[in-house]
Image (spheres, helix red, strand yellow):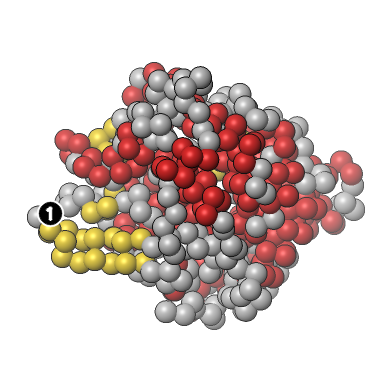
Amino acid sequence: MKNIKITLSLLLLVGFSSCDDFLSEIPDNRTQIDTPEKISELLVTAYPNRSYFPIAEVMSDNVYDTEVQSTSIINEESYNWEMQSQIGLDSENAFCMASYEAIAAANQALDAIEKLGSPATLNPQKGEALIARAYNHFMLVSLWSNRYNPATAATDLGVPYITKPETELLVKYKRNTVQEVFTFIEQDLTEGMKYVTNEYKEPKYHFTIDAAKAFAARFYLIKGDWDKVLEFTEGLGSKPTKLRNYPAFYAAAFAQMPIEYSRVEQETNLLVDYPNSIANRSASYRFALPGNKSDEIFGVQTNIWAKANVIRPNGQYYGGINVFVPKLYEYFKYTNLTSRTGEPYTATVLFSNDEMYLNRIEALVMKNRFAEVNTELGYFLGTRTTGYNATTDILNETVVTNKFPVIANEFTPYYSLTPLQTSYIKAIVEARRRDFIREGLRWFDIKRFNLVVTHNTLEFGKVVRSNVLEKDDKRRALQIPLRASDNGIEKNPR
């Protein structure tokens, strides 16, 4: 695909970046986006070119101190929920900047469409741009703000919601509230879904109709609009055939597994991205998943029927001290073969039918439709259970409540849960934890359910520091990157 060379400094959120490194040209010295082809090419850059996986994953309870002598400052700071001091690959600053670059590309595309008279022939590009803009803002507010709570959203600090291309050298931005950001996201998402299409040469790299529905289901799950979640997941059915085939995944050669996981040919994968990232390497750092702790996530005792889970670590570093599920494929693009230097890109699945299905089941729980929940959750867990027998392995309220008893003050979303709902929600959250290990989704469950997390630092196997992320801990909202706060963006309270 052609590479449109646009001066991204003019598209970037200027207030969120350092102006010393660029913006050396006058504002109008840029490639003109004045044809449908150029707009389509520009939209390729409306997806973040950095990954949030290592940031979110290391903050979650999927990660422990392995004590291996291989770490990074970013890895350690994320583990301790500290403000990051680095701006390199997979840093908070890098993902923040990349998200606003993607938003800038979407805004430039929308501006170009408007200047061309907004013809109906450009509706697909308009739909993609609107949804991409909504998605990037959604990820930013999900990481850098407090969890969504309608009782406080009107005063909670959100992120700047940018809807116009930059035309000035230096612009100062204020943070919208969380409520304002969610309102803008919903407006863009609703409008964009009127026009989004499946007509792409490579559809899995764009927001298609199904990918947009998956995003909508995630958004409305966070917002607590259960009817909307069910509306956007209706087409999955009670026993969808397009879930990930984990037995086939584990039957592949080890080196092939990460490639298989993110292949666009996999029916479950709805949106795939290749950001500039070394997310795959984070499994080798000190703060990762150690083999002696992996049973807490993958062990037989975590299975609803006390059978072996299909999903399990199948890779290891340092003789098994660190273990991982081999799902992140890194493609290293050499820029100089002689010096063996280049840029790493990691295949990431941003949306899938698997997540969409679990979101649907959670909405059914909240609507008290437990007969359907038993059918659908039982089916999903069966596809993840070795030796599953549909005749004898029955999911019902007794099985779920015995396996996941209610613990006082454990799950505390902003809405109320009955004891039965709590047990089922716990079952779904644990299923999501295993399915999306290494992909960061666990952090968002920790955040919205206000789960307490303890990160211990060890020395020769003994705890020398116990760092507890309490309920409503201010560190649940990432601190605004230093480059942004230096340009006037208000910091999060600490």
The picture places residue 261, in percent across and down from the top left corner, at: 47, 30
**Quadrant where the C terminus is found in the figure:** bottom left
Q: Please tell me which residue lies in front, 108 or 234.
A: 234
The relative height of residue 254 versus residue 339 in the rendered view (above or below) is: above
**Res 394 seen here:** yes
Q: Please tell me which residue lies in front, 461 or 114.
A: 461
**Quadrant where the N terminus is found in the figure:** top right
Seen at 35% across and 28% down, the residue is 308
Which element carries disc 1, helix, strand or loop?
A: loop
Q: How many numbered discs?
A: 1
The picture places residue 257, in percent across and down from the top left corner, at: 40, 26
Residue most extreme to the front: 398
The picture places residue 192, in percent across and down from the top left corner, at: 77, 50
The relative height of residue 292 versus residue 159 in the rendered view (above or below) is: above
Seen at 59% across and 62% down, the residue is 416
Instruction: Name the residue beneath numbered marker 1.
Output: 461
Seen at 68% across and 30% down, the residue is 237
Q: Please tell me which residue lies in front, 166 or 134.
A: 134
Q: In the figure, residue 355 lies in which quadrant? A: top right
Q: In the figure, residue 300 lies in which quadrant? A: top left
**Res 37 seen here:** no
Residue type marked 1: Gly
Q: Is residue 71 left or right of residue 425?
A: left
The picture places residue 291, in percent across and down from the top left corner, at: 23, 40
Q: Residues within 10 Å of mark 1 (few under 14, many from 20)?
A: few
Q: Please tell me which residue lies in front, 159 or 87.
A: 159
